[in-house]
Image: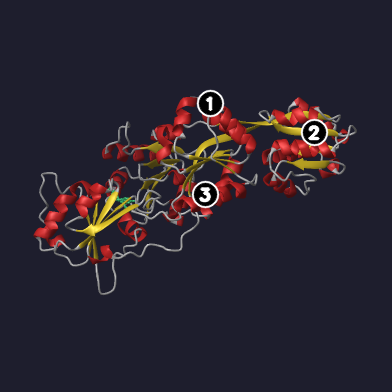
């Protein structure tokens, strides 16, 4: 008999991907299928294994949402196929999350399940806005209610009055559309119009908005600031407190979309996230290696004849050494060779293989690399340039003016990976609204971004700061019709991070929140 699967009901936390629990993350990292809705962060979905099937069941413009019964059925079917399924739910699965209904269906089908509790937005969105749910001498309790079913017939449910007369912090989820009804209901029960009230949109997320006021003016403020769902309403004395964090990271609130190959974007993601940025993979490129192709093979066999090897990317360094090992060679085959690298990132990668770069230009640009090489080589030199198929021609032009001999060999290529996930979410059309910056790390990455529909791609970059790792990438971008806004001074991950940090701090200094 086929092994039965299992369903993990995992709370994803309130939105900030850092607020998922360690256990939830563990389940995500080892599941075969994840069933998620709109409150789930893209970053969490990136944590699942490559083979994992991602099934979107939420509501989003242009997509039909699944009915709860259909979701229940889906979970049962997946588990019956023997899959380990994560049902990822915003906040905590049992806080207005319909987790209980899913469990009843699983129980009925005799499918094992586990509940992994999550940080609920009912507490975390408030904390993020600086509103403590309780505070000594001010609020001794907090109460959470759904505002969703309130106005089905435009009336308040009978237990609302009891709720309204409680003295602690009153918290309404899914209540934004019914705010006027909630306010009047509370005042009818004797809450003074001066009672502090706040509304938090997108709590813990980069687009977080907090509007504060009192029962009398909160609705008008919500309208004035265009507050939208998902939002939480807080009523009570603590809503007037502001304990929001003051020790902010340099990239706090900054949203960055990154493009490139996994080896690069993985590290860039880490660097930018550690600085407090919210980072999302926008376009993944995969590396196609040609290290076993004839021309590279010939180069490996003829290493003795070369005096310099020129690396114009960290990918080239990695691929070159992988190929060298596969040839049954080792570092001794390179003892007589000098190395030139285009920038710090490439030089650092080379150092990992135990070699110092003999020449790295001051400005990390191919043209400077070529000029520097020109001064260092003679007609007795022979250079090997193992690089991407889209390498800059400037290098060839300058080397052609020297008497040295060189071999420009294609070692790898980068290609665009499928965007199925983005399509499923129907959200890439307008990345402008979601990001402050987008980074490009190679000419091929820039080209790939414009590949399918260059006009739509151009439009999607309107109003965004476009960051390039170096001049070559910037040139490729310009050839596609878009000038780079920022070019990293240092050709490395740290260089990109520095450029963004500097710009973001200039932009946010002096800018006060709503
Ligand atoms: N299970 C979830 C709640 C699901 S109900 C939890 O524990 O958080 C959906 C409602 O939660 C939304 O309508 C909104 O009121 C609230 N909500 C969820 N995430 C939110 C966020 N990041 N900011 C503000 N409200 C949020």
Mark 2: few/some/many CA within 10 Å (<14, 14-19, 20+): many
Query: Which of the two residues, 79 or 260, is positioned nearer the viewer here?
Result: 260
- Marks 2,1: beta carbons within 8 A: no
Q: Secondary structure at mark 2?
A: strand
As drawn, which residue projects farthest toward the front? 510
Quick check: 404 above or below 175? above
**From the viewer's perspective, is 481 left or right of 378?**
left
Q: Does ligand 1 reach within 8 Å of label 1's beta carbon?
A: no
- Colouring style: secondary structure
Q: What percent of the width, then of the height, locates residue 329? A: 82, 39
**From the viewer's perspective, is 409 left or right of 490?**
right
- Marks 1,3: beta carbons within 8 A: no
Quick check: 61 above or below 115? above
Between discs 1 and 3, the one toward the N terminus: 1
**From the viewer's perspective, is 30 left or right of 243?**
right
Measured Cα–Cα span from mark 2 to mark 3: 38 Å
**Label 1 vs label 3, nearer the camera:** 3
Residue 419 in view in this figure = yes
Measured Cα–Cα span from mark 2 to mark 1: 30 Å
Between discs 2 and 3, the one toward the N terminus: 2
Query: What label sits on residue 451 in the rendered view?
Result: 1
Q: Secondary structure at mark 3?
A: helix
Q: What percent of the width, then of the height, locates residue 403? A: 86, 29
Q: Residue at x 61, y 32 (%)?
A: 475
Query: Which of the two residues, 264 or 421, is positioned nearer the viewer here?
Result: 264
Mark 1: few/some/many CA within 10 Å (<14, 14-19, 20+): few
Q: Residue at x 43, y 34 (%)?
A: 428
Measured Cα–Cα span from mark 1 to mark 3: 29 Å
Mark 3: few/some/many CA within 10 Å (<14, 14-19, 20+): few
Q: Which residue is mark 2?
A: 384
Q: What percent of the width, then of the height, locates residue 402? A: 83, 30
């Amino acid at each position: 008999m086929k092994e039965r699967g299992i369903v993990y009901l995992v709370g994803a936390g309130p939105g900030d991907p850092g607020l998922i629990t360690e256990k939830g993350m563990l389940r995500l990292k080892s599941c075969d299928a994840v069933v998620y809705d709109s409150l789930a962060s893209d970053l969490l979905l990136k944590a699942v294994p490559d083979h994992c099937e991602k099934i979107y069941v939420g509501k989003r413009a242009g997509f039909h949402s699944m009915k709860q019964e259909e979701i229940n059925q889906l979970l049962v079917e997946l588990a019956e196929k023997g899959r380990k399924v994560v049902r990822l739910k915003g906040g905590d699965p049992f806080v207005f999350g319909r987790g209980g209904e899913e469990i009843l269906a699983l129980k009925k089908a005799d499918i094992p399940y586990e509940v992994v509790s999550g940080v609920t937005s009912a507490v975390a969105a408030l904390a993020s806005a600086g509103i403590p749910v309780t505070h000594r001498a001010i609020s001794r309790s907090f109460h959470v209610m759904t505002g969703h079913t309130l106005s089905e017939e435009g009336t308040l449910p009978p237990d609302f009055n009891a709720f309204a007369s409680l003295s602690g912090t009153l918290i309404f989820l899914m209540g934004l559309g019914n705010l006027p009804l909630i306010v009047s209901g509370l005042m009818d029960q004797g809450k003074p119009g001066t009672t502090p009230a706040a509304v938090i949109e997108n709590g813990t997320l980069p687009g977080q908005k907090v509007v504060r006021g009192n029962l009398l003016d909160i609705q008008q403020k919500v309208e004035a600031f265009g507050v939208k769902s998902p939002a939480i309403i807080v009523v009570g004395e603590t809503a007037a407190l502001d304990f929001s964090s003051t020790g902010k990271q340099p990239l706090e609130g900054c949203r960055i979309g990154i493009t490139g190959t996994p080896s690069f974007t993985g590290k860039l993601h880490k660097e930018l996230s550690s600085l407090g940025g919210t980072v999302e993979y926008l376009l993944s490129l995969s590396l196609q290696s040609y290290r076993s192709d004839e021309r590279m093979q010939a180069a490996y066999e003829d290493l003795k004849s070369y005096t310099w090897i020129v690396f114009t990317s960290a990918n080239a360094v990695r691929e070159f050494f992988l190929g060298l090992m596969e040839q049954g060679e080792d570092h001794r085959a390179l003892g007589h060779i000098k190395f030139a690298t285009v920038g710090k990132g490439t030089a650092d990668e080379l150092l990992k293989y135990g070699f110092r770069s003999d020449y790295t230009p001051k400005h990390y640009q191919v043209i400077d690399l070529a000029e520097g090489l020109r001064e260092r080589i003679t007609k007795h030199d022979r250079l090997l340039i193992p690089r991407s198929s889209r390498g800059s021609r400037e290098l060839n032009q300058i080397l052609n003016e020297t008497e040295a001999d060189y071999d420009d060999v294609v070692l790898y290529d980068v290609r665009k990976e499928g965007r199925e996930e983005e399509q499923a979410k129907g959200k890439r059309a307008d990345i402008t609204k979601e990001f402050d910056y987008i980074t490009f790390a190679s000419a091929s990455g820039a080209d790939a971004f414009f590949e399918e529909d260059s006009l739509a791609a151009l439009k999607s970059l309107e109003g965004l700061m476009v960051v390039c790792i170096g001049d070559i990438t910037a040139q490729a971008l310009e050839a596609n019709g878009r000038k780079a806004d920022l070019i990293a001074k240092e050709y490395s991950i740290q260089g990109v991070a520095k450029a963004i940090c500097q710009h973001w701090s200039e932009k946010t200094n002096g800018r006060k929140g709503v």
